[in-house]
């Protein structure tokens, strides 16, 4: 079975700190992720009209499990 290389957004964090917490949660459960900031974190340290947001991107086949973990629906 081949794995998809497509990445999908499973969550939009309100800043780099929240994104790092979610990244840690996913990676500690075996889900690789990529953080895709809407702008440079050194320029915008807060979120205004989407600036400072960070998309949490995972492989398409991991999206369902990642969303469950983020929502707290999957117990580890």
Image (cartoon, rainbow, N blue to C red):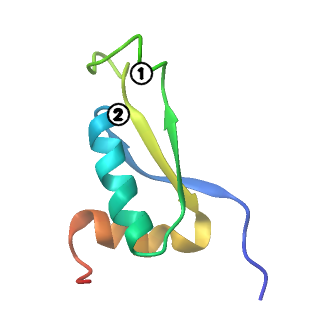
Residue 47 falls left or right of residue 24: left
Mark 1 and mark 2 residues within 8 Å of each other at the beta carbon: yes
Above or below, 6 against 16 in this view is below
Assign the C terminus to one quadrant of the image.
bottom left
Q: Where in the figure is residue 51, as x and y percent of width and height?
A: 38, 18
Q: Secondary structure at mark 2?
A: helix
Q: Where in the figure is residue 55, as x and y percent of width and height?
A: 45, 41
Q: What residue sits 33% from the left and 63% below the top?
A: 25
Q: What residue sits 35% from the left and 46% below the top?
A: 20
Q: Residue furthest top?
A: 43
Above or below, 65 against 36 in this view is below
Mark 1 is surrounded, within 10 Å at the Cα level, by few (under 14), some (14 to 19) or many (20 or more) other residues, namely some
Q: Quadrant of residue 75?
A: bottom left
Q: Secondary structure at mark 1?
A: loop
Q: Quadrant of residue 24?
A: bottom left
Residue 6 falls left or right of residue 67: right
Q: Earlier in the sequence, mark 1 or mark 2?
A: 2
Task: Indicate which disc residue 29 carries.
Answer: none
Residue 57 falls left or right of residue 10: right
Considering depth in this image, is 35 or 71 the residue closer to the camera? Answer: 35
Mark 2 is surrounded, within 10 Å at the Cα level, by few (under 14), some (14 to 19) or many (20 or more) other residues, namely many
Q: Where in the figure is residue 50, as x and y percent of width and height?
A: 36, 23
Considering depth in this image, is 6 or 43 the residue closer to the camera? Answer: 43
Q: Where in the figure is residue 9, as x and y percent of width and height?
A: 50, 51
Q: Quadrant of residue 60?
A: bottom right
Residue at numbered disc 2: 16
Query: Marks 1 and 2, how far apart in space?
Result: 7 Å
Q: What residue sits 29% from the left and 51% below the top?
A: 21
Residue at numbered disc 1: 41
């Amino acid at each position: 079975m081949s794995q998809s290389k497509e990445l999908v957004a499973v969550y939009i964090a309100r800043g780099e700190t929240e994104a790092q917490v979610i990244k840690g949660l996913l990676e500690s459960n075996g889900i690789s992720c990529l953080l895709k900031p809407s702008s440079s974190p050194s320029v915008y340290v807060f979120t205004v009209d989407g600036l400072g947001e960070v998309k949490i991107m995972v492989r398409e086949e991991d999206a369902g499990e990642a969303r469950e973990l983020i929502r707290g629906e999957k117990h580890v």
